[in-house]
Image (tube, rainbow, N blue to C red):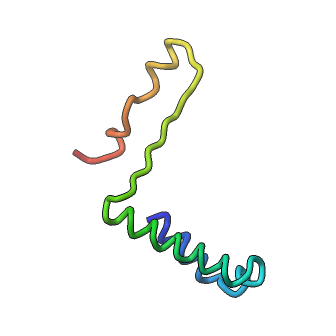
Amino acid sequence: MTLDHWTNRFEEKGAQLREMVGDKRYRIWRAYLAGCAYGFRQNWIALHQIVAVKADQSQLQALPLTREYMYDT
């Protein structure tokens, strides 16, 4: 969904972007955004984030190990 938002803003600013980077680079990035969005929708691409912190034991217990708390089960 993030790529959809990026693509919408990219398209809205298309004329300005073409002036900044040229038509060839604009078309490359347009295809890249579309390809990545398609890849995520087809589950060909995944993104994993690792958060590393330097903490003592009391702080470690406050950090959840997963993001399951964010989703209804």
The C terminus, quarter of image: top left
Give the camera-side residue of 37 and 65.
Answer: 37
Q: Position of residue 32 (x, y in %)?
A: 53, 70
Answer above or below: position of 13 versus 58: below
The residue most toward the right is 20
Answer above or below: position of 15 versus 3: below
Task: Please give left or right for residue 66 compared with residue 22 in the image.
Answer: left
The residue most toward the front is 24
Q: How many marks?
A: 0
The residue most toward the bottom is 15
Give the camera-side residue of 12 and 22.
Answer: 22
Q: Position of residue 3 (x, y in %)?
A: 49, 67
Q: Position of residue 48 (x, y in %)?
A: 44, 44
Residue at 59% in and 82% down: 11
Task: Please give left or right for residue 20 compared with residue 38 in the image.
Answer: right
The residue most toward the top is 57
Answer above or below: position of 42 versus 15: above
The N terminus, quarter of image: bottom left
Residue at 43% in and 68% down: 37
Residue at 46% in and 23% down: 62
Q: Position of residue 43 (x, y in %)?
A: 32, 59
Give the camera-side residue of 42 and 5.
Answer: 42
